[in-house]
Amino acid sequence: MWYPTVRRTLRAVFQGLSQEALSACIQSLLKAADIIQKNKTQVDGQLFLIKHLLIMREQIAPFQANFAIKEISLDLKKTREAAFKILNPKAVPKFFRLNSHNAILEFLLEGTPEIKEHYIDSKKDVDRHLKLSCEHFIQQQTHIFVGNLEELLTKVAALKSMAVQGGPTYNLSQQPWAQPAKINDMVTATYRVMKSKLPSTLQSMSLYLANKDTEFILFKPVRSNVQQVFQRIQTLLQEEYSGEDLQIIACPSMEQVNLLLSVSK
C-alpha cells in the first residue's frame, strides 16, 4: 500500500514524462521520414513513418496512463489592445472622467489577461499522424497509378458543366486532347505504369510493414480508387465514343485491371 502522496506524485511524473517522450518521438519520426524521402523515395519515407507509428500505437495501447496534459497560458491580446488605447493621446482627457468611460477604468476592465487551457494528448497525436500518413500514401499511390486518367475525367466534367450552363455543345471525340488516338496513348501509358510500379510498391510495403494483413488494409483503398477510375473511364468511353473509336482506344477491360491488381491480395 503506497502512501497517497507517493502514488499521486509518481503518477503525475509518469504521465508528464510519457507525454513529453511521445511528443519528442513523433517529431523525431517526422524528421527521419523527411530525410528518407529526400535521400530515397517518397514511398520509403511514408512507409517508414507508417511502420513506426503503428509500432508506437501498439506498444502504448496496454498502458492505462493518461497521455493528455493540461497547459495553461495567458492570452495578452486584450491587454495589448487596451494598452494601445490608453497610450493614444486622444485618451488623455478620459483619464479624469468620473464615469464608465474613464480611460484607466476601461484599461483595468478590458485589459485583463485571459487564462486559457490547452489539452495536449500525445496518444491521440499518434493516431492523428498515423491517419494522415496513411491518407497521404493512398493519395500519392492513386495519383501515380491513374493520375492522368483522373485529370482527363476532370476536364470532361468541366466541358459537360459548361454545356449544361448554356455553353457550346461538344463532341468529345473531336476535342484535340480527347481524340481516340490520344485516349489510347493515355490508357496504354497508365496500364504500363501500373504494371511497372505496382510490384515495387508492394515490395516496399512488405519490406517496411512485414505484415500481410496490414499491407492488405493499407493498399485496399488504393486498389479501390484505381478500380473506380477505370470504371468511370469505361462508362465515359461507352457514352461518348463509337464502336470504331473504342477499338482504336483499346482501353483495358475491368477484368484486366482487376487481374493486375489481384497480385496485391
Image: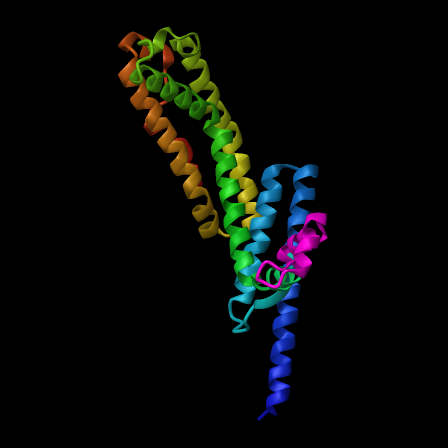
Looking at the rendered image, the quarter that the C terminus falls into is top left
Total number of numbered labels?
Answer: 0
Q: Position of residue 72 (x, y in %)?
A: 62, 66
Task: Name the residue nearer the viewer: 158 or 197.
Answer: 158
Image quadrant containing the N terminus: bottom right
Residue 203, quarter of picture: top right
Q: Is residue 53 left or right of residue 242?
A: right
* Left or right: 102, with 234 as reference point: right
Residue found 62% across the figure and 77% down from its top: 12
Q: Position of residue 143 (x, y in %)?
A: 49, 31
Image location (x, y in percent) of residue 132: 52, 47
Residue 94 lies within the magenta run: yes
| Vertical comparison of 40 with 66: above or below | above
Quadrant for residue 99, please give it: bottom right
Question: Residue 65 in the image: x percent, y percent?
Answer: 55, 73
225 lies above or below 101: above
Q: From this viewpoint, is residue 265 visible?
A: no
**What stretch of residues is rendered in magenta?**
77-103
Residue at 54% across / 50% down in the picture?
A: 209
Magenta stretch: residue 79 in it?
Answer: yes
